Amino acid sequence: MIEARHLTKIFKDKKRGEIRAVDDVSFTCRPGQIYGLLGANGAGKTTTLRLLATLLQPTSGAATLAGHDIATAAEKVRANAGFLAASTALYGRLTAREMITYFGRLNSLSGAEIKTRLKLLADELDMHEFLDRRCDKFSTGMKQKTSIARTLIHDPAVMIFDEPTLGLDVMTARSIVRFVRECRNRGKTVIYSTHVMSEVEKLCDFIGIIHGGRLVAEGTLAQLQQRYGEQDMEEVFVKAVGGEAALTAALNT
Amino acid sequence: MKWNFILTIYLKELKDSLRDRRTLISMIVIPTLLIPVLIFGVTTVMSKVMKQAREEATTVIIINGSDSPTVVAALRADNRFRVVTHAGDYKQLISEKKVRVAVEIPPGFETSLKSSTPQTVMIYHYQGELKSGMGAGELDKFFRAVRDKSVEARLTERGLPSSLVKPFEIKWENVAPPEKVGGNAFGGFIPYFIIILCFTGAMYPAMDLTAGEKERGTMETLLCSPVSRINIVLGKFLMVLTASVTTILLSILSMGASAAIGIMSFGQQATAAKAAGETIPTIDPLGLLGVVAMVAPVAVLFAALLLAISLFAKSYKEAQSYVSPLIIVIIMPAMLATLPGIELNVKLALVPILNLSLVCKEMLSGVWHWNLIAVIFSSSCLYAAVALAFCVKMFNRESVMFRA
């Protein structure tokens, strides 16, 4: 379960002054559900997810992950979350096995536990062939599989995905989408950020549209289609953010 | 602070760094290969150049002197000199290093020797130019000999013994023990090297473990783990410190091995020198141990400072541009200590790096100022602790960790 209440993050920039990257955002994401955070570049998706993963501290507002407060119990939050982003890379000089074992240890798992989990994940993700090869020699697909195994080694209750398909080829992106769905089916709480409309349509049970740091619309796909009188997700999105002009203006700032 | 996490992070960083070519080069190859190359290569080349310059006949222009044929003939006959025919402006020729020196023999020089009217022989040289300086020295010796001979001749003429010119002899003898001579000779040079190597040994892993990780995207992965940041900092810090200490130890070992090989290969010369009553400089091994102990807190200071500074950078390249100028900052006080006349006192004992260089110089000479050693060690520890605290603070600042 993720509960965000009036989350706000303000960055101070010397040239641009105060930037409200996340502005009074509240939402709830339940177990067995995928919450899609849809927004253009710079809308505040990554900052919101970084706040939830306790990589950043909120300026105001609060949030809990699996019952733990992000401000007061950051370590417990991280112990219960798996964070996968385009920006979370692998150690090139380690092998996949070393990489996953390392994160198992950092999650306080015993040697035996790591071994069992690693075997299970390698079976599921079909990783045995490259488990003992160094990550810098991997194809994109192998890298993604290793990253997934890294996020899942401690079997977290909450999964946070920040544009995980960014820059990936179709096949790898499809396997990621399949994996996210699998997480939901296992009863995990999943939050998924993207700017790809089709992914939202296919994957998300609940959609939050974020624009200029604010959550401008929220609901199931059907609810949003009904509210904006559009069937196409892209049209729904454009209307929700206040039209093309508003979108262009936001992208130019 | 949890030691099992710190150890896990440290061991992973160690494994990772040992697989990194750049770190291996700065940590192992440079200290083990560079030191012998510097010690043997540079000194061999230098002594060869010096020997060549000394053996080569000095080119000299004689100005005037047509009425002093004996002196000119003696100069020409002397194999230390090669007289060059005066072609063009001698000042320009010396300045352009085409001729080493020129000597101006005053008119009627030989006649004046007999009439005992004092005259001046002018030697023209290029100040600061090694070969010209040596040539001028040789010329000076030559004319002093001419002067002595003329005095002797005059004394003989008057029926007086030549010993009147030299009523007594002057002799020099070294009274400082060999380790003090060695300490004085190498005492400035050894800490200077150790300080630089201590810094460069820490430089590459510090940049790789912070800015390098940010650039490659692994920093965010690591920060997602439940481990608190102080454990991450300490794990990384221990790795950088390991690199720095390894570099120092390897460089000391390599210096020791170079010295041993040096003694073996120059053994005959050393025995000859000893027989001639010269002191062979040695180094106090206890002093070397003292150096290692005093360098330890400075290594901590460097490791923490380098980590904090490179953490601020977004990329390895950016980190390099912050860290490289620091080498000059480190070298300046280290160099200052090699200058003669700068002696250790309470005020200087508080200046980081300079205090280390100065105290090392003393310890290598076998002098132990315990009070100052305590001041230096504790001040170094204090600076190191401040730097480490600063490093931890930087790791907790999101504006540094996620600099846009």
Image (cartoon, rainbow, N blue to C red):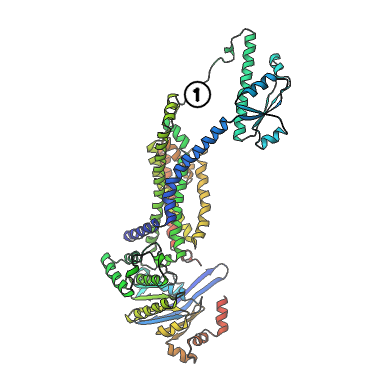
Number of labels in the image equals: 1
Q: Nearer the viewer, residue A155 or B97?
A: B97
Q: Is residue B146 visible?
A: yes
Q: Nearer the viewer, residue A112 or B303?
A: A112
* Picture quadrant of residue A67: bottom left
Q: Residue furthest top?
A: B159
Identified by mark 1, the residue type is Trp
Q: Is residue B340 visible?
A: no
* Vertical side of B106 occupied by B159: above or below: above
Rendered location of residue A69, percent (x, y): 37, 73
Helix, strand or loop status at disc 1: loop
* Vertical side of B79 occupied by A138: above or below: below
Rendered location of residue A137, percent (x, y): 41, 65
Q: Report the side of B83 relative to B211 (left or right).
A: right
Q: Quadrant of the N terminus of chain B?
A: bottom left
Q: Report the side of A157 relative to A246 (left or right).
A: left
Q: Kindly identify which chain the residue marked by label 1 belongs to.
A: B
Rendered location of residue B403, percent (x, y): 49, 66
- The residue that disc 1 covers is B172
Rendered location of residue B373, percent (x, y): 41, 41
The residue depicted at 44 percent of the width and 56 percent of the height is: B206
10 Å crowding of disc 1: few (<14), some (14-19), many (20+): few
The residue depicted at 47 percent of the width and 91 percent of the height is: A231
* Vertical side of A211 occupied by B188: above or below: above
The residue depicted at 34 percent of the width and 80 percent of the height is: A182
* Picture quadrant of residue A126: bottom left
Q: Report the side of A121 relative to A20 (left or right).
A: left
